[in-house]
């Protein structure tokens, strides 16, 4: 049975579509139009109490019973547990994946997301302050990732769910006004990830 995938064409949605394709899991996209406020519907709130996408419903969850999961990081961990793919069993290797997954969830997402917000602010003074603050932090985070990818092929050393999480936001680098040429290790990793057939399908599938 297919996983029901509630999403929209956003970085957090693309994390999951890439992972689903890479893991070879059957799924059905259930678009949630966040431009029309569909994320606030009572039906969706039963699945995602934080009224945000993405969320999934797996009809064949643990023990064969259905399960719903919200928050993109939690979904990635669940899918890794379900399939055993991109999610090491060894605790030492798994902790490296969790470190970089949490790095993305706590910073490399919220910070460029603020850049996206302030680019649309009309008041010049408000826009200038916000862009200066959040662009500096976004670029700092790109530098952190660039250093890491100068040491390792992928964020956690081996390809993992952390890479799908980070890729969702790196995909928007042009929107948050970052030139990957300034971060050559990130550029190498980004191009390698996007060239993967499964990842490419995950970014091509219609989510909206």
Image: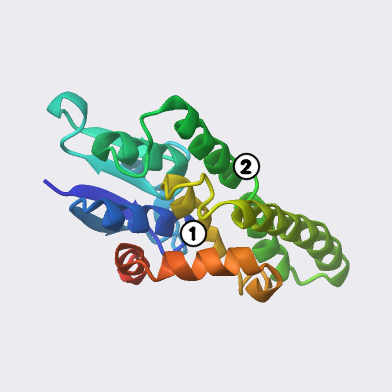
Q: Residue at x 51, y 31 (%)?
A: 95
Q: Give the quarter of the image for residue 62.
A: top left
Q: Residue at x 23, y 49 (%)?
A: 4
Q: Give the quarter of the image for residue 32.
A: bottom left
User: Taking the image as drawn, is residue 172 in sight?
Assistant: no
Q: Position of residue 66 (x, y in %)?
A: 19, 32
Q: Residue at x 37, y 67 (%)?
A: 203
Mark 1 vs mark 2, CA separation in Å: 14 Å
Q: Position of residue 18 (x, y in %)?
A: 36, 58
Q: Secondary structure at mark 2?
A: helix
Q: Residue at x 49, y 39 (%)?
A: 97
Q: Is residue 198 above or below residue 97?
A: below
Q: Position of residue 64 (x, y in %)?
A: 13, 28
Q: Which residue is mark 2?
A: 106
Q: Is 105 placed left or right of 1 in the picture?
A: right
Q: Which residue is mark 1?
A: 168
Comparing 53 with 190, the one in front is 190
Comparing 98 with 175, the one in front is 98
The C terminus lies in quadrant: bottom left
Q: Residue furthest right?
A: 125
Comparing 39 with 153, the one in front is 153
Q: Secondary structure at mark 1?
A: helix
């Amino acid at each position: 049975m297919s996983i029901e995938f509630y999403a929209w064409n956003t970085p957090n949605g693309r994390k999951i579509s890439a992972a689903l394709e890479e893991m070879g899991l059957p799924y059905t996209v259930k678009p949630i139009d966040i431009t029309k406020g569909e994320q606030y519907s009572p039906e969706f709130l039963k699945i995602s109490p934080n009224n945000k996408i993405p969320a999934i419903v797996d009809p064949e969850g643990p023990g064969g019973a259905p399960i719903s999961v919200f928050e993109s990081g939690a979904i990635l961990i669940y899918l890794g547990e379900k399939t055993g793919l991109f999610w090491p069993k060894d605790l030492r290797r798994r902790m490296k994946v969790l470190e970089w997954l949490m790095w993305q969830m706590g910073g490399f997402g919220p910070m460029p997301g603020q850049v996206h917000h302030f680019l649309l602010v009309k008041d010049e003074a408000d826009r200038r302050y916000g862009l200066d603050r959040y662009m500096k932090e976004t670029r700092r985070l790109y530098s952190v990732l660039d250093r890491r990818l100068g040491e390792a092929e992928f964020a956690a050393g081996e390809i993992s769910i952390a890479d799908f999480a980070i890729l969702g936001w790196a995909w928007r680098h042009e929107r948050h006004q970052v030139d990957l040429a300034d971060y050559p290790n990130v550029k190498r990793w980004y191009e390698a990830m996007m060239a993967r057939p499964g990842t490419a399908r995950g970014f091509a599938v219609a989510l909206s």
